Amino acid sequence: MKPTSAVLAVTYRCNSRCETCDIWKKDASSEIRADDFRRLPDGLRNINISGGEPFLRDDLVEVVQVLREKYPKACLVISTNGLTPERIEREVRKMGRVGVRVSIDAVGALNEEVRGVRGAFELAVETVDRLLALGLPDLGISSTISHRTVGDLRKLKEMAESRGIQFVTNLVHSSPTYFGEHDDKIPTKDELERELIWLRERELPSRRPKDWFRAYLTDGMIDQLAGKKRRIRCHAGRCLFFMSPDGDIYPCNIWPEKMGNILVESYEEMVARSERIFEEVDRCGVQCWMSCTVAPAMRRRPLGPALWVAKHKLSRRRSAA
């Protein structure tokens, strides 16, 4: 099984101080060179360029160019906090065909509080509007739901809709590899379930098929709240992987044990000696449900999600009749 999706943390440098993420506290001294990204395995089709804050790399345009040369048909999406609107607009102009997700977790002053930066909301919105003016076709807002921001979920969804852009949301997660420990920031079950049901019902009638499958993702978060078993088998390390800025490869950004380093050996060599890790991943008790790990499984096994969408779209039509 060859990987088709990857999350590439190109830097741990970050100009945010988010309370739901400890990446900004990490050692950011080691980053592989742009040309080293050529060492990644062939066949990737969906690549999330993440951080830290990717746009703090002076050679980010070169990194994107290397990835575009190696994966000419891949979907490249950059996750950014949007705190440097002019720089982001300037760099994106040079990149050509990329997608961008601007992280906004709440509206106004609350977003400043949870992201630890004065003016964070206005700067992120300015970034969205600058990229919208560029005519960027793959643009969206990405939101992390925590106990403090769950009440702003509807406002953020409506903000994205008013601009005709995408909206992606994930529940706050803990990870020794990536995010840090943040289980204490998960919203109460009743409040979160109410907001997720609202979001799911908002996504299903959309004219965008992508939103229908986001409704499936949202429904999976509702299952997660109820303690239900993950509805799609995880293929971390096989159909997707996570790479840290220094080239370390992990099955995903939750799993604590690395498979190897791309500067030392090929991905294929790592896989050949990682059977024990894969067996442990199969028994993983975390049962995480994040778009970056679930979406690759949905693309690999699309029938289940497609049947769910068809069933719920049909049910809505019957209810409206």
Image (cartoon, rainbow, N blue to C red):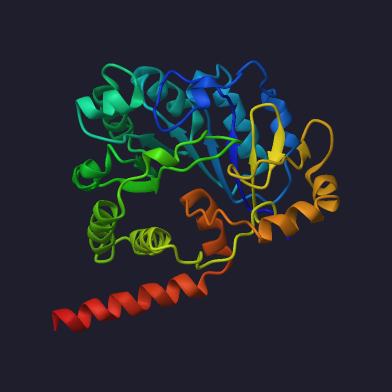
Residue 52 in the image, given as x and y percentages of width and height: 51, 26
Instruction: Point out the image quarter for the N terminus.
Output: bottom right
Which of 24/87 is in front?
24
- Determine the residue positioned at 30% across, 41% down: 147
Q: Residue at x 28, y 24 (%)?
A: 113
Instruction: Locate residue 8: give its quadrant.
Output: top right
Percent from the top left, x then y, of residue 249?
Answer: 71, 39
Counting from the top left corner in percent of width and height, residue 312 is at 31, 75
- Residue 108 in view in this figure: yes
Instruction: Identify the image quadrant of the C terminus.
Output: bottom left
Q: Position of residue 212 (x, y in %)?
A: 34, 64
Image position of 181 with respect to 229: above or below: above
The vertical placement of 43 against 144, above or below, is below
Placement of 314 over or under 27, stated as above or below: below
Q: Nearer the viewer, residue 300 or 201?
A: 201
To which quarter of the image does residue 105 belong?
top left
Viewer-proximal residue among 62 and 309: 309
Which residue: 69% across, 24% down?
32
- Say whether residue 163 is visible: no
Which residue is at a point 40% across and 74% down the rendered structure image? 308
Residue found at the far left of this picture? 321
Q: Nearer the viewer, residue 229 or 94?
A: 229
What count of labels does the image hold?
0
Eyeballing the image, is 39 above or below 187? above
Image side of residue 127 versus residue 259, left or right: left
Q: Is residue 94 left or right of residue 215?
A: right
